[in-house]
Amino acid sequence: MKKLILLTFLCVITITSQAQTSLVDYLTTAMPKRETRAVWLTTLANLDWPKTYATSPERIEQQKQELVDILDKYQKANINTVLLQARVRAATIYPSALEPWDKCITGVEGGVPGGDYDPLAFAVAECHKRGMEIHAWIATIPVGAKGSLGCRTLMKKGFRIRSFSTGAYLDPSDPSVAPYLASICGEIVRNYDVDGINLDYIRYPDGWPRPSYRLGDTPDQRRSNITAIVRAIHDEVKAIKPWVKMSCSPIGKHADLGRYSSKNFNAHDRVSQEAQEWLRQGLMDQLYPMQYFRGDNYYPFLADWMENRYQREIVSGLGTYFLDPREGNWTLSDLTRQMYVSRNLGAGHAHFRSLFLTSNKQGVYDFEKQFNAALALPHAMLTTATMGDAPVAAGASLVVRNDDKSVVIRWKSVAPYYNIYVSNTYPVDTDDPRNLLFARFVGQSLRLKNVSPDLFFAVRGMSRYGVETPALQEVDNAVSLAPSHVSLLANDGNTLSLPAAAKLTDADHYVVLTLQGSAVRSVKAKTIHNNQLNIASLPNGMYSLQVWGRKKRSFRVGYFMVRRGM
């Protein structure tokens, strides 16, 4: 069980002369309870996973174990979102009725792994087991080499495809592209419990000729073509499962800013992505802009994304791969400062890509664990959907404590997920991320070993949209009684009937007090029989009754009046 301590850490980062905020401001920013912390897990050419081909039962198990090891590392760093490349280049890592298997799984294009192994289904189960969201990362417009099986399959279906030195691409102006890509995403959402669809390369390719201004080939029309694809995918996904998050990874600079140039490479004007408009229209729930830049090429453009997010979520894509000297010349401080500033502005972060994070380039994985010292929940979706009924205790109390220092937490509800909180103060502050013990827990009971008697628990249900219900506190049933809500406790002048809510599993003793707060009688809980408290020695008057637990905390049960011979 995690230790509840003040989570403090020291990190050395370089602040350049361009910084407008001091390092102390970033280090003292409260850790957020809601923050997307993501990683792109690349399957293209086996870059991140898998490293072993699934060509036998033994090698399938090895391929699975590779993924488990990666996800375990994510979990230790409190990563909460995995962007797994599910459609690679017109080929998939799952059995599709529309496209062939990608070669990354078996080493052969169209190769089917043996048995009932489904890599995407396995990944979904393993991510959810760890309380992580998993989003299917979809490469949209690229279709691989012209001679690849995926590309040939699309050509046989009659799609317009153009080839460049970087590979072959679907023509975004082809009217059949939008419904086809929507069907791919629909297939995934119908068959898998993914939490999101992340569209990659939803744009015109870099080598595509500039607009000709003939036959409708204008910048506005190109943006309209891409938006039509986005809308078709959005409508298909939301019609099936409206809680699945729609996101994409646009170019890291939306457009030129008043004081800062995008240097002729931006989302809106160069590659026809109206990403901010997609947020405004609700076609996207999140954006993961690929901000693989430093200095003035990063910070002003991050601020622009945040200022134009229309109450939706921005997750800054980090160029973590530049920490490898073969890829770039970044230092760890280049990246960590971006992470601090992103958090300060309310943005999440996503590492591109997994291998560079998990291999701890320049200590980035160690820093990630420190930066994410407490769990965080991904942001809830902007939705009108209700959060549902709050959990209630399954018995007299939410928590049952056993002599072997184990506790059993049981509750009743119909929520798909539960967030479990723990603290050494009552009531548990469920807005403090340091108190979050388990996120997206599935089930309605949990057993914990070697639990300190000084800890309290609380449970909040959470909807598919990420909206939490009010908290069920450990002793809710015992402390909910108050004189303004209940009648006086029943008694006959000699015995007082204890209410059912007073029977705490950890009750140590009961105390009777005058209204001035003076204790006039104390009774050990174990001496009480048939739930009756002897009050024969008390004079007439008004009293309150408190119950004390073994944690040395007390709660008022209610008030009663002794009225003999009146």
Image (tube, rainbow, N blue to C red):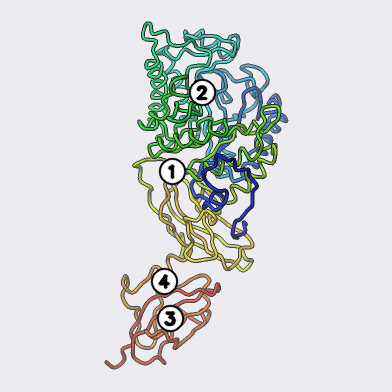
CB under 8 Å between discs 3 and 4: no
Dot placed on the residue nearer the N-terminal end, 3 or 2: 2
Q: CA distance from mark 1 to mark 2?
A: 35 Å
For disc 2, the marked residue is: 263
CB under 8 Å between discs 3 and 1: no
Q: Quadrant of the C terminus?
A: bottom left
Residue depicted at 31% across the width and 91% down the height: 564
Residue 111 picture location, percent across and down: 64, 19
Q: Is residue 430 left or right of residue 361?
A: left
The answer to which image quadrant residue 60 occupies is top right
Amino acid type, callout 1: Ala
Q: Is residue 121 left or right of residue 114?
A: left
Residue 391 picture location, percent across and down: 43, 55
Closer to the observer: label 3 or label 2?
2
Dot placed on the residue nearer the N-terminal end, 3 or 1: 1
Closer to the observer: label 2 or label 4?
2
Dot placed on the residue nearer the N-terminal end, 1 or 2: 2
Closer to the observer: label 3 or label 1?
1
Q: CA distance from mark 2 to mark 4?
A: 71 Å
Residue depicted at 73% across the width and 30% down the height: 58
